[in-house]
Amino acid sequence: MKRTLTAEEREREAKKLRLLEELEDTWLPYLTPKDEEFYEQWQLKYPKLVLREAGSVSEEIHKEVQEAFFTLHRHGCLFRDLVRIQGKDLLTPVSRILIGNPGCTYKYLNTRLFSVPWPVKGSSINYTEAEIATACQTFLKLNGYLQMETIQALEELAVKEKANEDVVPLCISEFPRVGVGSSRDKVDLKSRTAYNVTLLNFMDPQKMPYLKDEPYFGMGKMAVSWHHDENLVDRSAVAVYSYSCEDSEEDNEDESEFEGRDPNTWHVGFKISWDIEAPGLAIPLHQGDCYFMLDDLNATHQHCVLAGSQPRFSSTHRVAECSTGTLDYILQRCQLALQNVRGDLDSGDISLKSFEPAVLKQGEEIHNEVEFEWLRQFWFQGSRYTKCTDWWCEPMTQLEGLWKKMESVTNAVLHEVKREGLPAEQRNEMLTAILASLTTRQNLRREWHARSVL
């Protein structure tokens, strides 16, 4: 059964089609560091994008992070995701793993990822291998470093804005380190840089011959298409540590021989969303480079990852919007749904305290949330999480038990609806309250069943 597109998805597709129609057979202009106006346009059109070249990061961090990447890859901890786009299941060319605060999840392209917990203070985590524990500790350390760098960057740009500075950098390493572009009083920098997860990515382009071509600028093959990062705290920053497995020959290649970007070098591309006037940027990424998307850049601009010729890892640190995406949240929702249960009867059935339509409606909505946003998302991804830790096993077993109780609640409601002597008006009110949730449940179960047999 094909899913109906949301209004946001329809609008995005319409914008994309309009842009492609305007372009016809021409390319939009884009700039690389060898273009004279590259740094000026960066300053004018992309002031909230900051690059840290590898030389500004300590050798200790480079060594530990790169070892951690290879450790997780060697243990088979990164997986390609089966994501849902416009009702179709697509396997991502990039392999990923989410690491972050215990109990955190991150949802993108209709797929919920469950974080392998990093060892925050006070946590007790049973990792499958000591090497994996060390790797998770390393990414927690990197997270703290990138958070401090981001806060400093935001503070420095605020100072520059106040002084109304307008300096064009001479090279990337001298580019202004900061930028928020906001005059709001006392901005809470920490809340917008409190990275709670990192999404690790890996791709070997030699094993992915079918990569899409970049459609607007002619930038070449894309590892990740144009997008905004989803489900983040409003105006929060994103920090990315990039590690491409370059060899000495490629490091010494002269990029000037290429028209446009060097296809052997990984780049991150940026453009103003749905704009055909401002040139795009293609910024080369080398071993250990970091870049930062500050303030509202992720909302006003789109970015893509342009493939090089060698394998590449990245660690993308985010402030995930977790108000509805933590284990504590969904357990509290279960408690809310089941507070209407009076208790188990000898027959194994349950009795309910209230058949008020609002109470029933809320219970069935939570029932759907537990099943389709958590249980099916988790089990559909198989045993991937147990590669690193058993942390999620007990909570998901607990959630499954609570879901079974909700199944019993639904049966109790349907039994009451069928009870002889129930006034017709009350029966209709009860059915009206639960019908939408039951219909959604039936449709989603069919959809998930179809996905599971692919």
Image: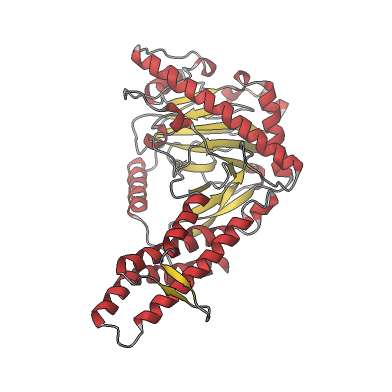
Which of the colour schemes (rainbow, by chain, secondary structure, one colour) is used?
A: secondary structure
Q: Is residue 369 visible?
A: yes
Q: Position of residue 94 (x, y in %)?
A: 59, 46
Which residue is more in the foreground, 401 or 137? 401
Residue at horizontal 53%, vertical 28%? 147
Q: Quadrant of the C terminus?
A: bottom right
Q: Position of residue 399 (x, y in %)?
A: 54, 61
Which residue is more in the foreground, 255 or 301? 301
Residue 364 to residue 373: above or below: below
Picture mark count:
0
Taking 421 as reference, is 325 left or right? Answer: right
- Image-quadrant location for residue 167: top left
Residue at the right extreme, as displayed: 130
Residue 230 to residue 379: above or below: above
Q: Is residue 379 visible?
A: no
Residue 185 to residue 211: above or below: above
Q: Position of residue 21 (x, y in %)?
A: 34, 45
Q: Quadrant of the N terminus?
A: bottom left
Residue at horizontal 71%, vertical 37%? 134
Residue at the left extreme, as displayed: 425
Taking 257 as reference, is 226 left or right? Answer: left
Q: Position of residue 42 (x, y in %)?
A: 43, 23
Taking 71 as reference, is 48 left or right? Answer: left
